[in-house]
Image (cartoon, rainbow, N blue to C red):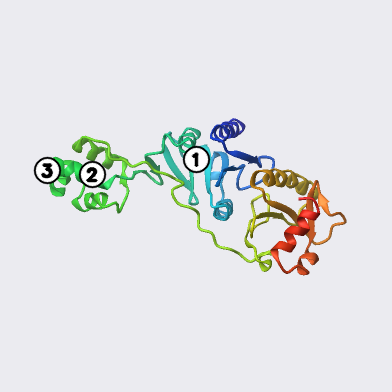
Amino acid sequence: MREQLVQEVAEVLLNCNYLSVFCTRIHSCFDMLAKREREALLVKVLENVDAFTKQQAEDMRKIAGMLSGNGFIVGDRTNEYKLEDGVLYERHKVPAGNIRTFRGIVEGDEFPKMRKFRELLVDIDEAKMARAREKLKLSLKELSKRSGISKDTLYRYEHGRIYASEENARKIEEILGMELRKFIDPFGGRQKFVSEDTLISMLGFESVKTKTAPFDILGRERKLLFAGEEADRRTMAKRAEVYSDIMDAFGSGSCFILNKYSKDSIAGIPVVRKNEIKEISKARELMKLIEERGA
């Protein structure tokens, strides 16, 4: 099931002209890192979206913030229910949905009109609701009597202060004779970015640390730098493949930052030793060293 979902997500991204880097062979907070012009999209594919951990969510948000992009979880179900078409869910503040919902969002022709936390919620178009009510010459008090919804709640719907339950939205729409639901864009706002102290921040890089990505440090000065730290050789070899694809997609630099290593590269990805970084004072010097060693 998951393999099929991965294939479907890959097809959606390809059809929408995204260039994707696949990380499905490595334990990671994302399975695909996709780029289209200046847009970046991180996608995690899971049968059960409840398997997405808080740490993975934190790392995905950090990376999305650094890349001025967004993250999304594509899944089939939670522990309690199957994901419905056209409904936006959330796991640890990362938007989630089934493959049909994801396709509609990425293709831009079928944004969801409901979101679900504990219940289905609808974002009512407040201006449309007010115009429809005034056209029918209905006061909030009269609409309250006919719908069974409190006047205060209707007021807050009409001023965009709260979401409406699906049931309440349906009642109001039936009385006013029109659909009032807004489309929900999960990518409407960018993730906030906060730079962290890392091995390369002292050189002038903005940077973040991750625990569940294929790289341990993501830095940015004039261009991006994806860096991995100590790991077993098999893991570093797998990571090297991903770094090579990331460099092609993002025009970035990549390296391993290790305590000691006899060679200057691993599968074509440069190795920089920690004692060498101590002797470097500027981001430009580190990038030049990486370029000289093959990146």
User: Would residue 155 be seen by someone viewing this image from the given angle?
Assistant: yes
250 relative to 192 in the view: left or right: right
Q: Quadrant of the N terminus?
A: top right
Position above or below: 72 against 290 = above
291 relative to 41 in the view: left or right: right
Q: Name the element at disc 2.
A: helix
Q: Nearer the viewer, residue 10 or 233?
A: 10
What distance separates the C-alpha of mark 3 from that of mark 1? 44 Å
Task: Name the spot of residue 163 as percent of width and height, x first.
Answer: 32, 48
Q: Which mark is residue 137?
A: 3
Task: Name the spot of residue 181 as percent of width and height, x first.
Answer: 31, 40
Which residue is painted at 79% across and 53% down in the image? 270
- Local packing at callout 3 (Cα closer than 10 Å; few below 14, some 14-19, many 20+) is few
- Local packing at callout 2 (Cα closer than 10 Å; few below 14, some 14-19, many 20+) is many
Q: Earlier in the sequence, mark 3 or mark 1?
A: 1
Looking at the rendering, which quadrant does residue 108 occupy? top left
Q: How many marks?
A: 3
Q: Label 1 belongs to which residue?
A: 78
Q: Label 2 belongs to which residue?
A: 129
Task: Name the spot of residue 183 as percent of width and height, x first.
Answer: 37, 41
Q: Name the element at disc 3.
A: loop
Position above or below: 5 against 50 = above
Circles 3 and 2: CB atoms closer than 8 Å: no
What distance separates the C-alpha of mark 1 from that of mark 2? 33 Å
Position above or below: 15 against 234 = above
Q: Earlier in the sequence, mark 1 or mark 2?
A: 1
119 relative to 8 in the view: left or right: left
- Give the residue type at disc 2: Met
- Local packing at callout 1 (Cα closer than 10 Å; few below 14, some 14-19, many 20+) is some
- Give the residue type at disc 1: Thr
- Give the residue type at disc 3: Lys
What distance separates the C-alpha of mark 3 from that of mark 2? 12 Å
